Each structure stands twice: as structure tokens, then as C-alpha cells.
Image: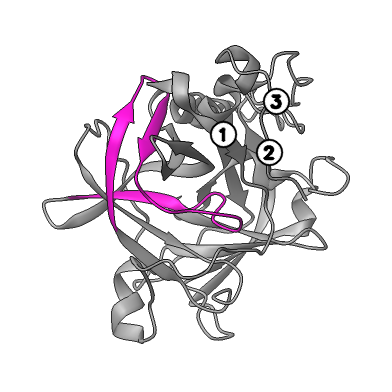
Amino acid sequence: MFTRFFLMILLALPVMAQGQQSMRKLLSADEARAWQAVGRINMAGAGFCTGALIAPNLVLTAAHCMFDPQTHEKLSPDRISFLAGWRQGRAVAHGQARRTIVHPDYQHGKSAEVERVAVDIAVIELEHPIRNAAIVPFERYQRPNIGDQVKIVSYAKERSEMPSLEEACEVLGKTTQVMVMSCNVNFGSSGSPIFVMHNGVPKIASVVSAKANWQEQNVALGTSLGAPLDLLLAELAMGNDVFKSKKPGRLSLAEQLGRKKSSFLTN
């Protein structure tokens, strides 16, 4: 399946393609109520991403959101804050980052690789848990299958002040590490939670890492949340410091897939 992918890594920039027919803004408080645990991650001087609470003090997002897109340096926690339920200039709750945990195998840089997408996952530990009856952290959906319907809630350019919901998506393919979905994501959707509805309850199956073109259609790529997330939570429980990212590998995704050239979305 991956032999025909043309991958473009999404950077943590407030830019978004327009005219997505399946995406709609959550304009009213009633519409946004079910998604209050999704919020905007502000990185001082480095744009913003989207993240979601998986515990009162833990925000799940993409690893590349934890790096400055200009300097490629890892952001210090004091530059990172989480605005839960951010809508029209107000947040239901606010949290300041205490530390960030990035997968140890994540490689930050301009080259893109299958392995990079597979571990493009990070957890932000907040200084104080968010205790608000209106905000319920999301559970993980353990076994997404091909054909499952998925939804993405995200912030981006021209909708940075309120969340938008894309719900006409499905899982097109998957490996043990990467999910491929029909969602039409672009710049600014980095770290957005990908939900599967289970018994009427949204559960997180993945987070947006990259976009690709496959069989002449735009698709979204996300990290499977099994072992990669378990590893981060284990390191968090042990009190380990922030992981240090490895240097980028030599082979680009295009080279790994037998293509001579590829183009990547950069800042």
C-alpha cells in the first residue's frame, strides 16, 4: 500500500487549505460541547497546533509540534500552553506545560520517513490537572479497522478561534504503526485527534501527523496509538526527562519507496 505514497510532513504552522466540503466550524456552544477536551496548543513565537486531553494533566499531540519550525530546536515547556475548548477568544480551561515527552525514535528535520510518521507522537504534561466537569478526557480506541468511520477536530488558519469538525472520513489502510485515512488535512491540522465513535462515545484512534497523495486522492496519515503511546506513558510514570530527538536518517520516504524525487511541505 505504501509504495504509491507521496508524503508531505505537516509543520506546526497556522495555515490551512480552504474549501473542504466535509469540514464545518463548531459555531455554537452546544455543537462544541462534546469536544471540550480538544484544545489549541499555543507555542509562543512558533505558531500553534491542536491537542486533546487523555487525562486531566496530559495532552496528546504530534511530536513535530514540540519543535520550533524555524530553528528546529525543541521548545521549552514554558513556551507551551493548552487552551481546552478554545472558542471565539475564550477557553473553557487553560493549562501550562510542565514538561513534554517525545517518542525516543522520533527524528525531527526536513526529511520525511515512514518511521518518522510511525512515532510522530508526544504528550504534554500540564503543571496542574484540568478539573472541570464540562471537560472529560478522551479514552483511546485500541483497534481501529479498515473501513471504520473517523472524525477529526482541529484548529487552523481562518478557523483558529473555534474548532472545526471533519466527519466524512474513513480508515483506508493501516499497518501496525501507521493509519491511512481519507480525511483532507493540510497545514495547521498537526496533532489533531482522530476519533472513532464507539457506542456513541468518541475515542481517540490516532493523531494527525502528515498528509499524502494516494491513488489520486488526498489522505491523512496518523500514528497508531498502541505501543508508541504506551511507551510515552511508561516514561512519564517513571519521571524520566524529555526525550532527545535523534538525528534525521539518511533515506527520505521517496527513496525508501523507490522514487527519486519527493516534495515536502516546509515552512
Which mark's residue is nearer the viewer, 2 or 3?
Answer: 2
- Answer whether residue 148 is magenta in the image: no
Q: Is residue 66 above or below residue 179?
A: below
Using residue 165 as the reference point, say whether residue 244 is left or right of it: right
Determine which of the numbered discs, if any, sits on residue 264 in the image: 2
Amino acid type at mark 3: Gln
- At x 46%, y 44%, the residue is 207
x and y, in percent, of residue 30 in the image:
29, 83
Q: Label 3's element? A: loop
Coordinates of residue 40 in the picture (x, y in percent): 57, 65
- The residue lying toward the viewer, choosing from 50 and 166, is 166
- Dot 1 amino acid type: Leu
User: Which circle marks residue 7 in the picture?
Assistant: 1
Q: Are marks 1 and 3 in contact (CB under 8 Å)?
A: no
Task: Look at 55% across and 84% down and name the residue there.
Answer: 90
| Mark 2–mark 1 CB contact (< 8 Å) | yes
Residue at mark 2 to residue at mark 3: CA–CA distance: 15 Å
Marked residue nearer the N-terminal end (1 or 3): 1
The N terminus - image quarter:
top left
